[in-house]
Image (cartoon, rainbow, N blue to C red):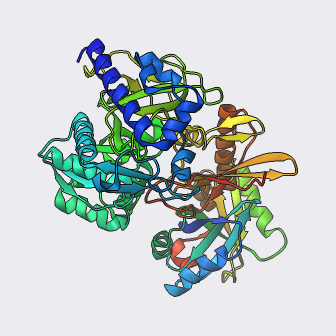
Amino acid sequence: MPREELQELQLERLQQTVERAYHNVPHYRKAMQEVGAEPGDIKSLQDLQKLPFTYKTDLRDNYPYGMFAVPLSEVVRIHSSSGTTGKPTVVGYTRNDLNVWSELMARSLTCGGATKNDVIHNAYGYGLFTGGLGIHYGAEKIGASVIPISGGNTKRQVMIMKDYGSTVLTCTPSYALNIAEVMEEMGITPEDLKLKVGIFGAEPWSDNMRKEIEHKLGILALDIYGLSEIIGPGVAIECPAKQGLHIFEDHFIPEIINPDTGEVLPYGSVGELVFTSLTKEALPMIRYRTRDISSLSLEECSCGRTHVRMKRVSGRTDDMLIIRGVNVFPSQIESVLLEIGQTEPHYQIIVDRVGTLDTIEVLVEVSASFFSDEVRRLEELEKKIRGEIETTLGLTVKVRLVEPKTIERSEGKAKRVIDRRKI
Amino acid sequence: MKVKQISVFLENKSGRLAAVTAVLAKHGINIRALSIADTSDFGILRLIVDQPDKAFEVLKQEDFTVSVTDVIGVEMPDQPGGLAQVLAELEKAEINIEYLYAFLGKAPGGALVVFKVENIDTAIEKLLASGVKLLPGETLYKM
């Protein structure tokens, strides 16, 4: 679709969304009135900037159903976050929302190279988390064979991938590495499997981690993006060109803002991703602050798709650690570790405060391939890791080598940071 | 003439050494000699055992980082100057010693020291040529 036509479609859908939100959701009406905005003010896509942001706390404050724009009788599915950081956020879908979501997931899987001939091994968690069922419906829509295995019991996962001939793996990137590790232990090589593509998301990961997964599983690893507040997985997906994720702009408008000032930044700038849904019925989202850090590009992709692309999420504004005034993202440390390559990418970052000084300690598991019986070689490794992290972050850090399997393995999102500071 | 030593990575926290010895005990593996090199954060446990290959396998299965290293077992007169003489031979041959530790118990003819050296094949050759007695692994494991 030519850009002009797309923008016409976006504007029309935006106007409908704002209208629906204003009239059916007291929160939106109040928030818009506070800034003196009305649905009629939206005459161009630029006018979106007149509308206030929506925050995760708005969903919590209106827990559980206060942000819904339709009566519960029209809601056919409810998902929710785990609520580990506060009250869970509840999201609802009408029949049409589910159709749209399935369609977007079908597009995503197709973009990743999946067809009806594939066996999709879906190790995203099923249940209230949107990952499992999101992928599931999309996979069924393209006519692939879905294995709804969900997370956990990794040995059985490997056995099933081998015996059932899984060709596409979908899970979090940290779980993919966990699976690769268990495969090694079981003596199963990528050649024993039929896997060709992995579609990974739900947590920030680095390019080096991609290489590690691709090498260990012998597959093409692609990034998928989504969040339950917007619709779930399938908001954007990488194509095999790996030049950023294509955002499905006929259903969502992305913006990049300065997280501190809220100012909208031009294409190419790094900032916080903000999404507005264009077709959601049950839970319209207007300028939702994702907390994810990315940038947008309109450059043409070699795959021929014309929708705007977002860069792989490099961190979260709320994951960002501020240590002695320096912004630190766990992904930066992960990148260094993977580059050194002599250690398994199992690590944990412990932040503490001694007196008034923040300290950062990185625990790294020693891999069998590097282990030496000489103290000085292990000390050299520690020193090398420390040096590279310090160069990257501009901060002094402590590196501690730990025994394998002592850092907790994740079957979902990895817990990389333990912040013990009491501020 | 090489001797297989088992090296294990241990974090410096209580119970880790006990855990290794418990695994060996469970599998009926007897320790012949051991030493620990440590820093404030971690240690490396070095072991000569009666069944090195089995020890490697069972420790690996229990998720320890473990490796097998070649060392040499040197027998020397149990009297003043016994070790000095062996060290002099190594120095003459310009072979660096990474570390050494004594064997529990005694060789029939004297004291026994385990050496980890930089160039093990040359070291074996030179020591044998100068009349120093080396004990092969098979002998040590059973001592």
Does residue A357 appear in the picture of this structure? yes
What residue is at 54 percent from the left and 81 percent from the top?
A: B24
Q: Is residue A313 left or right of residue A144?
A: right
Q: Kindly identify the residue that appears in the image at 63 percent across and 68 percent down.
A: B46
Quarter of the view holding residue B107: bottom right
Image x and y of residue A255, in percent: 47, 25
Where is residue A419? Give x, y as percent.
Answer: 69, 53
Residue A276: x, y in percent? 42, 32
Position of residue A408 relative to residue A228, above or below, is below
Foreground of the two, A162 or A300: A300
Picture quadrant of residue A236:
top left
Position of residue B86 measured from the top left corner of the image (x, y, whole percent)? 73, 62
- Screen quadrant of the N terminus of chain A: top left
Instruction: Tell which of A321 and A396 is nearer to you.
Output: A321
| Location of residue A309 with respect to A155 vertically, above or below | above
Q: Is residue A223 left or right of residue B73?
A: left
